[in-house]
Image (cartoon, rainbow, N blue to C red):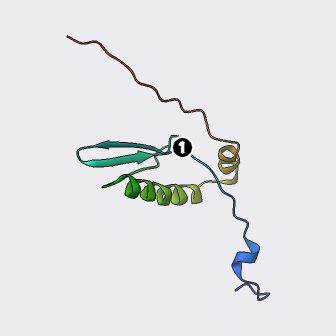
Amino acid sequence: MLPDGEPYAYNCTMKTLKFTAIIEGDKDGYYAYCPELKGCQTQGDSVEEALSNLREAAELFVETLGAEELERLGAGPKTILSTSLEVAHG
């Protein structure tokens, strides 16, 4: 409670930010990261676990950002393109 008796929730404004989640799988499990949040990465034994871990990591990451960085992130996600690539060898 705050000194005026109001619960904290009434004095907080919650903003939802949307990020790209990239999840890659291999024989050892799944690796997940958010390209917009440099260094925000995690892993899991399943896609669901990796995504859950990434959500938690992103929430903690965002808590460390200043107002200016949050404003930049709130402007919208950057464009992420995914395609296949063929490479000749031998």
Q: Which residue is drawn at 52% across and 29% down?
A: 81
* Image position, residue 29 (x, y; %): 28, 49
Q: Mark 1 points at which residue?
A: 20
Q: Is residue 62 above or below residue 13?
A: above
* Image position, residue 25 (x, y; %): 32, 43
Q: What quarter of the picture does the N terminus occupy?
A: bottom right
* Image position, residue 31 (x, y; %): 36, 46
Of helix, strand and loop, which one carries label 1? loop
Q: Which residue is drawn at 45% across and 26% down?
A: 83
Horizontal arrangement in the rendering, residue 87 relative to residue 5 (left or right): left
Q: Is residue 47 above or below residue 90?
A: below
Q: In this view, does 35 lie above or below 83?
A: below
* Image position, residue 59 (x, y; %): 54, 59
Q: Nearer the viewer, residue 79 or 64?
A: 79
Q: Nearer the viewer, residue 65 or 90?
A: 90
Q: Residue at x 48, y 29 (%)?
A: 82
Q: Which residue is drawn at 58% across and 55% down?
A: 62
Badge 1: residue crowd in 10 Å (few <14, some 14–19, many ≥20): some
Total numbered circles? 1
Q: What quarter of the picture does the C terminus occupy?
A: top left
What is the residue that sits farthest to the right in this orientation?
Answer: 4
The amino acid type found where label 1 is placed reads Thr
